[in-house]
Image: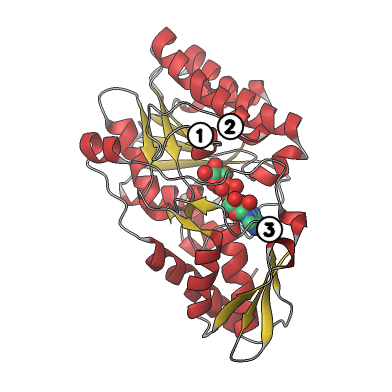
């Protein structure tokens, strides 16, 4: 605490959730220390778009450098630490399994150790994930559903999750694990499927491209919520009187295909599907143009076919509800990308 202000450290400040969380905490009058990786390809574009870049104190941070993490915690003694830094793209985790395990598994252990040794009053939030449920053992998934991760990413995140539980049971570290289902926004990176769809459709709609959008598995289903809703829940977890694990989701599931169709409506596409599996295409009947094409290159070695979370515990204990539903989320994202495309700032 400095000048009566609570201090929050956010790792992964340049990412989608980092921006929304920083904005939320600044509105609550926190002093926000934003941790970012020097030399990362990420820029501060999202923080600029939120209009908060100059309000955040930016500090160099490297998830794989234990000494750096220790120094930061010893020096700043933050009230709260939100770990949003990760190799967060599931598909990349098969190409970079070792790095993913180091960053998403060991990196979290480094932070927990640094808290235990140098800043034991710091409350810790870990960005856990529905990918830990993977090949789901129960529908819908709750905090009690057995885990079955399907990617090096999911396995690494599972290690981090159990480290949080273990450090809170063993050393009294206030470590919370938020099992967040997919959460999206206009700030989402374009490697993730929702934003890949809205950005590409916006380009077709505004005449910037004639190329069809290439996608992998159209039939996978996800429980998609709005990042801006979910960051509130991260904060709520750390205000509670004991550390715990919570599922954060909307309780609805939709396929990639449905997301494509919903986004297409806002581009005036009269979408019709033809062919099957890797030969499937989506045609805009109005123009006869192929706007979507399946490319097996985007299939995953092991797919998570369906995720749907039950957020009842978060509702009951923390009085939290997702406010933005599937259709509103899709609308928000496609309209934002159409605006950006029209202004020539769709990046
Ligand atoms: N990215 C991508 N690109 N996904 C595609 C594509 C494509 O061209 N075509 C189909 N998909 C399918 C994937 O196979 C997957 O089933 C689904 O779309 C969602 O993929 P992503 O948007 O990349 O997200 P994710 O579900 O793998 O992971 C996201 O959510 C997790 C929470 O469940 C990420 O944000 C993770 O970091 C997060 O933990």
- Please tell me whether residue 328 is drawn above or below residue 244 in the rendered image: below
Q: Residue at x 39, y 47 (%)?
A: 230
- Please tell me whether residue 119 is drawn above or below residue 236 in the rendered image: above
Circle on res. 149:
2
> What colouring does the structure picture have?
secondary structure
Disc 2, disc 3: CB below 8 Å? no
| Mark 3 / mark 1, whichever is N-terminal | 1
Q: Quadrant of the C terminus?
A: bottom right
Q: Is residue 157 left or right of residue 64?
A: left
- Please tell me whether residue 226 is drawn above or below residue 331 in the rendered image: above
Q: Secondary structure at mark 2?
A: loop
Q: Which residue is mark 3?
A: 216
How far apart marks 3 and 1 lie (CA) works out to: 21 Å
Mark 3 closeness class: few <14, some 14–19, many ≥20 residues within 10 Å: some
User: Picture coordinates of residue 61 (x, y %)?
Assistant: 62, 35
Name which quarter of the figure residue 337 lies in. bottom right
Decide which of 310, 50 is in the foreground and name it. 310
- Please tell me whether residue 207 is drawn above or below residue 133 in the rendered image: below
Q: Which residue is mark 1?
A: 133
Circle on res. 31:
none
Q: Residue at x 55, y 60 (%)?
A: 256
User: Picture coordinates of residue 62 (x, y %)?
Assistant: 66, 33
| Mark 1 / mark 2, whichever is N-terminal | 1
Q: Is residue 77 visible?
A: yes
Disc 1, disc 2: CB below 8 Å? yes
User: Picture coordinates of residue 344 (x, y %)?
Assistant: 64, 80
């Amino acid at each position: 605490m400095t000048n009566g202000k609570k201090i929050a450290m956010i790792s992964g400040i340049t990412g989608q959730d980092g921006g929304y969380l920083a904005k939320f905490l600044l509105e609550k009058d926190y002093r926000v220390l934003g941790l970012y990786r020097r030399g990362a390809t990420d820029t501060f574009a999202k923080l600029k778009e939120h209009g908060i870049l100059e309000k955040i104190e930016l500090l160099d941070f490297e998830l794989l450098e234990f000494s750096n993490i220790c120094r930061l915690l010893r020096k700043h003694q933050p009230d709260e630490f939100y770990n949003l830094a990760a190799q967060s793209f599931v598909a990349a985790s098969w190409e970079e399994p070792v790095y993913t395990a180091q960053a998403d598994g060991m990196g979290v252990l480094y932070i927990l150790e640094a808290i235990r040794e140098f800043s034991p009053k710091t409350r810790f939030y870990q960005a856990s994930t529905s990918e830990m449920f993977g090949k789901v053992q129960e529908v819908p998934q709750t905090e009690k559903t057995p885990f079955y991760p399907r990617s090096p990413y999911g396995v690494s995140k599972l290690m981090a999750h159990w480290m949080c539980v273990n450090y809170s049971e063993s050393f009294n570290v206030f470590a919370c694990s938020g099992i967040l289902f997919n959460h999206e926004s206009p700030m989402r990176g374009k490697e993730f499927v929702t934003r890949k769809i809205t950005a590409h459709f916006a380009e077709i709609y505004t005449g910037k491209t004639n190329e069809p959008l290439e996608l992998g598995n159209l039939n996978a289903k996800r429980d998609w919520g709005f990042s801006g809703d979910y960051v509130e829940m991260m904060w709520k977890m750390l205000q509670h009187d004991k550390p715990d694990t919570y599922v954060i989701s909307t309780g609805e599931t939709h396929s990639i295909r449905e997301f494509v169709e919903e986004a297409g409506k806002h581009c005036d596409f009269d979408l019709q599907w033809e062919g099957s599996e890797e030969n499937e295409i989506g045609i805009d009947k109005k123009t006869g143009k192929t706007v979507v094409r399946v490319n097996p290159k985007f299939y995953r070695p092991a797919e998570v076919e369906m995720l749907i979370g039950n957020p009842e515990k978060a509702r009951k204990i923390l009085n939290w509800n997702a406010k933005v539903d599937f259709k509103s989320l899709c609308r928000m994202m496609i309209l934002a990308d159409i605006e950006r495309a029209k202004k020539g700032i769709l990046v």
